[in-house]
Amino acid sequence: MRFHHVGILVGDIKEHFDSHFIGELGINSMKGPVLDPNQQAFTAMITTGQGAGIELVSPTNSNSPLNAALQKGGGLHHVCYEVDDIRHAFDSLHSSGMIPVSAPTPATLFEGLKVAFLYSKMGGLVELVEAPSDE
């Protein structure tokens, strides 16, 4: 497992990016936002000059499961790790006591690479993203 990014839950991706990342931090490179219907979310990826990733996540509508967390203030939503074998990593973390939230499914932001979510009582929400193949 390799650190990939942190996810931040916000009400409006463009507004948050413009005011915080461009306005306060001077970071002006963002991929997205894109609609991810599997997650009922809009997502966008920001990469800093050091290569660290920050994903902005926003609910698509009032039915999105992200709304409950957003109503509590949003903010840090998840930590993501890149894995070579997402099914193996998902099953292994589940066996170690983590609670599955969503099984591996293709993610729009990552060009169809699969992502999965699990919940850790010790560390909160964890996302796995499969590593791109070397082909």
Image (cartoon, rainbow, N blue to C red):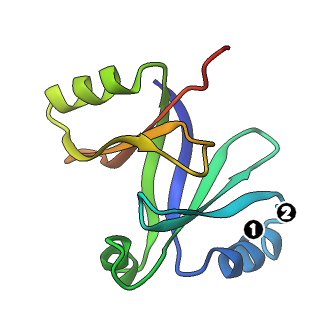
Q: Is residue 62 left or right of residue 129?
A: left
Label 1 near label 2: C-beta < 8 Å? yes
Residue 71 percent location from the top left of the image: 36, 84
Q: Secondary structure at mark 1?
A: helix
Q: Which disc number belongs to residue 21? A: 1
Say which residue appears at 85% left-offset and 65% top-offset: 26
Say which residue appears at 61% left-offset and 51% top-offset: 109
Amino acid type at mark 2: Asn
Q: Nearer the viewer, residue 128 or 74?
A: 128
Q: In which quarter of the view is residue 56 placed?
A: bottom right
Residue 53 percent location from the top left of the image: 65, 46
Q: Is residue 11 left or right of residue 69?
A: right
20 lies above or below 44: below
User: Mark 2 to mark 1: distance in Å?
Assistant: 7 Å
Residue bearing mark 2: 28
Say which residue appears at 33% left-offset and 25% top-offset: 87
Q: Earlier in the sequence, mark 2 or mark 1?
A: 1
Disc tally is 2
Residue 101 percent location from the top left of the image: 25, 50
